[in-house]
Amino acid sequence: MLDISTYKIAQIVLMSRELDRAEGELRAFIDRLSEDEQVSLVAVMWIGRDSFAADELEEALATAREEATTPTADYLLGTPHLSDHLENGLEALGLSAADDEDDLVRGG
């Protein structure tokens, strides 16, 4: 299924909500992800913004891999409502980053 943990997606969601002060940190975090993690992240975002349906995950992953012409951090940081799209994408896939987000906010 996904090659990225909900914990990592939760970190990205939280940082993207604080983009004015965390953009450098978020960009570095995304750049450190493996190619497979970056592909999964883009696919989740696309599902969350309704570019693909949840049952089209494999197609979204393949498309993300094939169409990766821009650095992933640049592409995602240029996407309005990134945190919402990621959360919606996870929810559509039957996953949630809410517990991970709570742990991160509490410093766990």
Image (cartoon, rainbow, N blue to C red):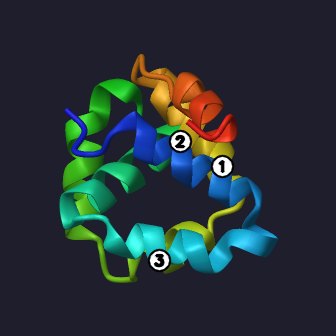
51 and 11: which is toward the camera: 11
Dot 2, how many residues are within 10 Å of its Cα: few (below 14), some (14-19), or many (20+)?
A: many
Q: For residue 67, what is the image quadrant?
A: bottom left
Question: Which residue was labeled with disc 3?
Answer: 28
CA distance separating discs 3 and 1 = 14 Å
Q: Amino acid at mark 2?
A: Ala
User: In x, y percent, where is residue 62?
Assistant: 19, 53
User: In x, y percent, where is residue 75?
Assistant: 50, 74
Q: Amino acid at mark 1?
A: Leu
Height in image: 74 above or below 5?
A: below
User: In x, y percent, where is residue 39?
Assistant: 28, 58
Question: Which residue was labeled with disc 1?
Answer: 14
Which residue is painted at 20% across and 39% down in the image? 58
Which residue is painted at 27% across and 55% down in the image? 37
Question: Which residue was labeled with disc 2?
Answer: 10
Q: Which quadrant of the rendered structure holds the C terminus?
A: top right
Which residue is painted at 40% across and 23% down in the image? 93
Mark 3 and mark 1 residues within 8 Å of each other at the beta carbon: no
Mark 3 and mark 2 residues within 8 Å of each other at the beta carbon: no
Dot 3, how many residues are within 10 Å of its Cα: few (below 14), some (14-19), or many (20+)?
A: few
Q: Amino acid at mark 3?
A: Ala
Which residue is painted at 53% across and 67% down in the image? 76
Height in image: 58 above or below 61?
A: above
State the residue lying farthest toward the right: 20
Label 1: state its secondary structure: helix
CA distance separating discs 3 and 2 = 15 Å
Along the polypeptide, which appears first: circle 3 or circle 2?
Answer: 2
Total marks shown come to 3
Mark 2 and mark 1 residues within 8 Å of each other at the beta carbon: yes
User: In x, y percent, where is residue 15?
Assistant: 65, 58
Q: Which quadrant of the rendered structure holds the N terminus?
A: top left
